[in-house]
Image: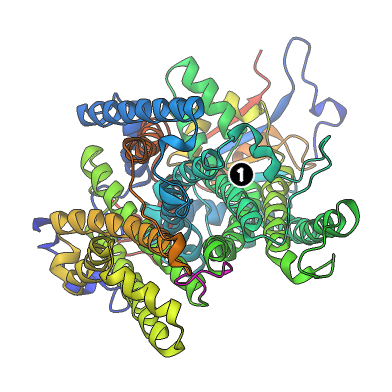
């Protein structure tokens, strides 16, 4: 790509030399202008097109849910023996998407990876919206969503309580707490930037809304000292949390006694897969935002290069897990395990298995090449392929195990219906509608953090232009 | 020391002076100025920056934050509360015999205990920050200054409150100017 043409290897590698984190006008005011412009100006035409499509899909989602509540879950393809079907596939997919946001915002923060600064806000927003989508699916999958409160330890007239020994209960706590903590972390990081928007506001309504959201922040150093401490602690808490969340999601499978599910590799395998799929979604979203909102100077090819490396790393982890599954099936000598693995690779859903392997293990291998890591078309195509592959991974895990378990008498098949597809497509509508509103009304890049990174005494280029 | 009791209450018809605000162009100038203001013996003052300037805590003599202790206490309470809830429900409130396991089968309760510890710890960090930073706050005298709006953009400020024993409008202004302030203004006190 032309953009990387002028770069030397030393500019990209943080070990060899200082990376150029952002380009162009790196003055404090320049950063403010670049970040605040999409929020303050009327959005580009592309935003309206994206928002329109997202709203249409959101309408499909509402329609699907309305029909579901009216008619019941018989409108879906899931039935005994494949009782989980698409809704739980979608749930695991969306929870996984969220994990890359927390990796970028919390884990890379603890590792002092300064390049995360340009993308962490948007990645955290992605986390929140993905978890919102995820939370919908178990709630509608239970069949009678109006009794979803039975999942919470609420004193009630029936004197019934949740069964805390069940991984499904652990999941209720893990995912809800993950959402809450992610929301607190995201909002805490945004308070100084909301104050910037408040102070730049030209209309009364903006002043009132951003003023209320900024909570009266005045950038006082005594406030900053508490803020930095709280941010560090939240990052430190979010890190074990995010690992626990997808581990708990994997317990939904691993604790069950089903062939193909009952393995100890599931927690790390699920966490790696979650970060893998989420990182691909961050790349997709950031490529679009970068072009649509002209953030080329803040979100540079350096960031995509780093994210592509993480995709490659987690892709090899996921590929390793696929290999271990096959090895253990053979090594265990368990006839049911062997059959489950053979059925995945050669049975009626073999097409899904091999598309999954192609998308998740083979496609990301192009990122061994730096030219591929810094090529926008390659990044875009591979990130989409990874998301397709990771959705299929959950589909393969759920459907191939359930449709042929121990007793051949209880074997069956799973065929999705129109409403399965509509609900999945609709959940993307919910996700992208929320994301469109986010980039329109909230600062999508962490201004104060970027200023601190760009103007730290050690940063290349000193205090900018 | 000048003024006395009338330091805070200006003449009739005028609002009390809240303090004085000096504007600086760079973090380096602010750091040097903060060191000098601290050495001059001021106690009720603060620096306002668009991003957390490192080294400022040492320059200003700002001591630690209670946020970590609040988060730790809340996190421990979350762990105890999470385990306590599961113990009460499973062993006291609604005991249910499953596969002959003990009612208080604590290893199965560890995941939820961990999650509730994180939840309350995070809430402790967030709300501890709000409490320690005295937020949310509907209004502040500093927001009366138009120039202060740049404190969230690209300028650096020092504010000295009139509550400070060493505060004196003229001498404080001279101090801030001598430290490189490009603009100094009194906050409050306008008719």
SS at mark 1? Answer: loop
| Residue B91 as seen in the image, left or right of residue A422 | right
* Farthest front residue in view: A409
Q: What residue appears at the point 84 percent right and 60 percent down from the top-left corner?
A: B87
Chain under numbered label 1? A
Name the spot of residue A1 as percent of width and height, x first: 10, 58
Name the spot of residue A48 as percent of width and height, x first: 26, 26
User: A276 or A135, which is in the foreground?
Assistant: A135
The answer to whether residue A199 is seen in the rendering is no
User: A386 or A255, which is in the foreground?
Assistant: A255
| Residue A20 as seen in the image, left or right of residue A250 | left
Where A446 sits versus A140, above or below?
below
The residue to which callout 1 is attached is A220
* Farthest right residue in view: B92
User: B10 or A112, which is in the foreground?
Assistant: A112
* Quadrant of the rendered image containing residue A229: bottom right
Name the spot of residue A269 as percent of width and height, x first: 44, 71
Q: What residue appears at the point 80 percent right and 22 percent down from the top-left corner?
A: B9
Asked if residue A256 is among those painted magenta in the image, a careful observer would answer: yes
Q: What is the total number of numbered labels drawn onto the structure image?
A: 1
* Quadrant of the rendered image containing residue A8: bottom left
Q: Which residues are magenta?
A: A255-262
Where A379 sits versus B163, above or below?
below
Asked if residue A105 is among those painted magenta in the image, a careful observer would answer: no
Q: What residue appears at the point 80 percent right and 69 percent down from the top-left corner?
A: B105
């Amino acid at each position: 790509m032309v953009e990387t043409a002028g770069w030397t290897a030393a500019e990209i590698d943080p070990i060899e030399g200082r990376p150029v984190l952002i380009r162009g006008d790196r003055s404090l005011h320049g950063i403010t202008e670049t970040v605040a412009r999409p929020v303050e100006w009327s959005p580009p035409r592309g935003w309206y097109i994206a928002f329109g499509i997202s709203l249409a899909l959101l309408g499909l989602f509402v329609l699907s849910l309305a029909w579901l509540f009216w008619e019941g879950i018989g409108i879906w393809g899931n039935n005994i023996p494949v009782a989980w079907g698409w809704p739980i596939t979608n749930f695991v997919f969306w929870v996984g998407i969220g994990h890359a946001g927390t990796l970028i915002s919390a884990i890379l923060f603890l590792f002092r990876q300064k390049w995360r600064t340009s993308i962490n806000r948007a990645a955290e927003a992605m986390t929140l919206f993905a978890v919102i989508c995820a939370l919908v699916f178990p709630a509608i999958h239970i069949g009678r969503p109006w009794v979803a409160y039975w999942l919470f330890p609420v004193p009630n007239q029936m004197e019934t309580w949740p069964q805390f020994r069940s991984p499904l209960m652990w999941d209720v706590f893990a995912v809800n707490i993950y959402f809450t903590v992610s929301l607190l972390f995201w909002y805490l990081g945004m308070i100084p930037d909301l104050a910037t928007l408040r102070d730049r506001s030209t209309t009364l309504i903006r002043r009132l809304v951003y003023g209320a959201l900024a909570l009266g922040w005045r950038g006082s150093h005594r406030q900053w000292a508490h803020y930095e401490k709280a941010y560090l602690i939240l990052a430190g808490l979010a890190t074990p949390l995010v690992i626990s969340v997808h581990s708990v999601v994997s317990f939904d499978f691993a604790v069950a006694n089903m062939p193909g599910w009952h393995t100890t590799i599931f927690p790390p395998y699920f966490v790696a897969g979650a970060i893998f799929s989420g990182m691909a979604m961050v790349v997709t979203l950031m490529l679009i935002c970068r072009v649509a909102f002209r953030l080329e100077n803040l979100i540079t090819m350096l960031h995509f290069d780093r994210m592509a490396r993480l995709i490659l790393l987690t892709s090899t982890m996921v590929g390793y897990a696929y290999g271990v599954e096959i090895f253990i099936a053979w090594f265990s000598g368990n006839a049911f395990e062997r059959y489950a693995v053979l059925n995945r690779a050669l049975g009626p859903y073999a097409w899904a298995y091999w598309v999954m392997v192609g998308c998740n293990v083979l496609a990301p291998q192009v990122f061994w090449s730096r030219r591929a890591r810094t090529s926008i078309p390659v990044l875009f195509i591979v990130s989409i392929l990874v998301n397709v592959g990771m959705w299929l991974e959950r589909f393969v895990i759920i459907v191939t195990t359930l449709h042929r378990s121990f007793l051949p008498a209880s074997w069956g098949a799973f065929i999705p219906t129109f409403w399965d597809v509509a609900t999945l497509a609709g959940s993307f509508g919910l996700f992208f509608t929320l994301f469109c509103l986010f980039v329109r009304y909230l600062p999508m890049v962490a201004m104060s953090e970027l200023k601190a990174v760009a103007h730290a005494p050690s940063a290349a280029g000193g205090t900018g232009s | 020391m000048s003024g006395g009791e009338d330091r805070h209450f200006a003449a009739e018809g005028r609002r009390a002076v809240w303090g004085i605000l000096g504007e600086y162009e760079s973090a380096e100038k602010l750091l040097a100025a903060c060191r000098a203001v601290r050495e001059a013996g001021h106690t009720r003052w603060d620096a306002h920056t668009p991003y957390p300037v490192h080294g400022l805590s040492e320059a200003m003599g700002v001591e630690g934050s209670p946020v970590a202790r609040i988060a730790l206490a809340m996190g421990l309470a979350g762990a105890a509360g999470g385990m306590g809830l599961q113990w009460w429900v499973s062993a006291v409130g609604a005991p249910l015999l499953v596969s002959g396991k003990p009612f208080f089968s604590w290893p199965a309760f560890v995941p939820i205990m961990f999650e509730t510890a994180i939840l309350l710890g995070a809430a402790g960090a967030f709300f501890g920050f709000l409490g320690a930073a005295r937020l949310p706050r509907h209004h502040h005298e500093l927001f009366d200054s138009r120039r202060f709006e740049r404190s969230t953009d690209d300028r650096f400020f020092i504010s000295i409150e009139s509550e400070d024993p060493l505060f004196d409008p003229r001498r404080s202004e001279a101090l801030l100017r001598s430290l490189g302030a490009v603009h100094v203004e009194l906050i409050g006190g306008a008719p």
